[in-house]
Image: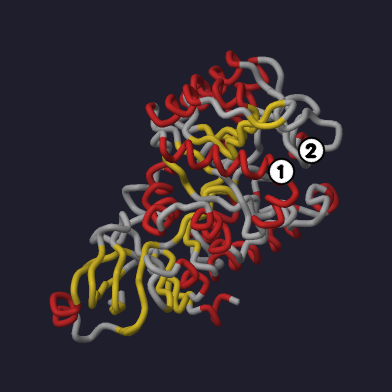
Amino acid sequence: MTEILITARRLVVGPADRTIDDAALVMDGGLITACGTRAEVEPTVPDAVRYDFPTGTMLPGLIDSHVHLSLGGERDPIAPLLHHTPDTLLRDMIERARQALAAGVTTIRDLGDMHGGAARLRDMIAAQSVSGPRVLAATVPLTCPGGHLAALGGEVASKREIRDRIRRNADMGADLIKVMASGGALTPGGPPMWAAQFDADQLGYIVEQAEAVGLPVAAHAHGTDTISHCVTAGVRTIEHCSWRTADGLRYDEAVAAAIARRNVAVCRCISGDWRGFLAQLGEKNAAALCDAIQRMRQAGVRFIAGTDAGVPGAPFGDYAGMLEFFAEIGFPNREIIDMATVNAADALGIADRAGRLETGYEADLLVVDGDPLTDLGSLRKPLLVAARGRIHRNEEIA
């Protein structure tokens, strides 16, 4: 294999408070084989292919913890799933994965499709048949009869149906189980967002059956009571976590404390069009949501970054826009970068190979023009992206 040397003005090791100035990194065979200062590393690889970025910052590849590769962002994103062949959908999913890669995203967690296309794409990318980020696939999400995204085929009610669906997902190659614990906004006639789709006992059984096949659970949960039940059930991550009730928002300090104590990660999904999203909520609810996020942070809740790409208003190429929301409400840049790298890798169960730039880790990284520790907008300017050691300049991805 050919050794590749990348140099940059600064390198973020991960977490973001660990940095190296005048840095160099070597990758070979898809792995990071050396990382340190240029003075330490450069002389050891005189024959390496090199990429030099004297004003750039190198950091771990970004992780989008919540996407839907099978959805294209249409006003009714479910309709194409019902009318397109699996091969047509896969072609579109490949393009969306490439868009994410061009934005510096080297890992995506797909939280629900219909035909197991995300697992198929994961294997194609791993085999280097196509370019793209690492994919973690939930396959078919569990929902109640007539519930949120029931069209994807995961309707369950009885314990037997729950067990069988989880086993079928595992047989399809699922990396995790996704449960629609509350209602959502994409299924006409389904339960409202705040309403529970499964009770506490059912959620506990879902986690139990997922653990029986070695899989963690990610729970879509908007309602305050549902969030509480998800924590008790032992889910790995809570998606959205928006504290909704029938008449607004109700933040629960005790539940937030339990989330932090049990080390459940929260993916507070929001797209790059967060200004439009907040405007849609209305001034009162938008202020309440932002306040709840800050209170969760103060309670010690661990956040991970996700765009919900694929739903209306959430494109695959605007990961940085989502991060800018957290800067707007007062999160320090270092915390935001950790949400997108080390925190996400820990929550997704890939911390042994991704989320950090250290010797022995898979070579997932990007180089940006500028320093995101002082200017988060520099993440909009990727100069180079490497996914498991494969170099992609943006003109080669697009």
Tell whether label 2 touches label 1 (CB within 8 Å): yes
Q: Is residue 37 left or right of residue 72?
A: left
Dot 2: few (<14), some (14–19), or many (≥20) neighbours within 10 Å? Answer: some
Residue 304, percent from left and from top:
47, 46
Q: Compare residues 202 and 256 and report the one nearer the observer.
A: 256
First in residue order: circle 1 vs circle 2: 1
Give percent across and percent down for residue 148.
Answer: 74, 34
Residue at the (65%, 66%) spot, across then down: 95
User: Which residue is located at x 39 percent, y 27 percent?
Assistant: 262
**10 Å crowding of disc 1: few (<14), some (14-19), many (20+):** many
- Mark 1 lies on a secondary structure that is loop
SS at mark 2 in the image: helix
Residue 245 is marked as: none
Please state which amino acid type lies under the numbered disc 1. Answer: Met
Would you say 88 lies left or right of 303 here?
right
Q: Is residue 261 above or below residue 319?
A: above
Quarter of the view holding residue 174: top right
Residue 147: x and y in percent read 76, 30
The residue shown at (53%, 60%) is: 324
Q: Does the image show residue 179?
A: no
Which label is found at residue 151?
2
Q: Inspect the image, locate mark 2, and give the three-letter code of the amino acid beneath it.
A: Ala
Quarter residue 274 falls in = bottom right
- Please identify the quadrant where the C terminus is shown: bottom right
